[in-house]
Image: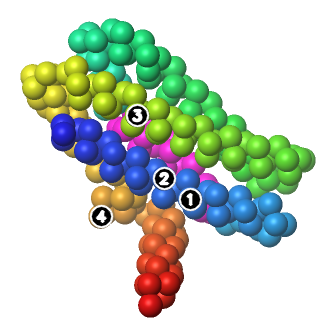
Amino acid sequence: MAKIIEALLEEHGNIEKLLAVLEHELDLFDHNRRPDYDILQSIIAYFEDYPQRCHHPKEEMIFSRLRERDPAAAATYGDVDDEHESEAQRLRGFADAVNAVLADQEILRESFHAAVHQFIDSQREHLRKEETLLFPAALHALRAEDWADIDARMSAEKDPLFDGDVAEKFHNLERTILRWEQEAEQARLAAAK
């Protein structure tokens, strides 16, 4: 498998961890408990930063090469740029809902729930589509020289949340994810006994 596809799949796994945190916070909200808005803002900041600046450009390079090598497969996928723009719009809707709550603006509970839920669902669908359509088509159609060129142009920038040196603004989010992973592992071990 191409190095960049492995990196993208790992990043998708990391995104899924964030979506699980969002689901947990949304569940708190749905049960009339206060979600951790600092966590929600950290997730928004993460999605505004790393995926937009580093993750999506990698996918767009792959899609561009796929369109050159196999236009039919690229057409089956659709347009990765349009997908990423739709995701950015859903992120803005999610951010606007959180900001409205924090600013004590009137927002229906259903509207807040819908904005967060739509973001989660659309992210998962987007990841699924890339993993089942885009990546396999690229692995089939692209040549060694395509992968070498993409790898050479790939950003070496580290993920500010998942690559060891966690950015200060993401420390609380990192602790939450690590705590949940430990709790899940403890529950798995207890169930296995």
Q: CB of mark 1 within 8 Å of CB of mark 3?
A: no
Closer to us: mark 1 or mark 4? 1
Q: Which mark is residue 16?
A: 2
Q: In x, y percent, where is residue 123?
A: 55, 40
Q: Label 1 vs label 4: CA separation?
A: 20 Å
Give the amino acid at mark 4: Gly
Q: Is residue 53 magenta?
A: yes
| Residue assigned mark 3 | 132
User: Which tag, 1 or 3, sits closer to the chain's start?
Assistant: 1
Q: Main secondary structure of the magenta part?
A: helix
Q: Is residue 22 above or below residue 89?
A: below
Q: Residue at x 48, y 68 (%)?
A: 177
Could you say whether the residue bearing mark 4 is in a helix, strand or loop? loop
Q: CB of mark 3 within 8 Å of CB of mark 2?
A: no
Q: Is residue 46 magenta?
A: yes
Q: Residue furthest bottom?
A: 193
User: Which tag, 4 or 3, sits closer to the chain's start?
Assistant: 3
Q: CB of mark 2 within 8 Å of CB of mark 1?
A: yes
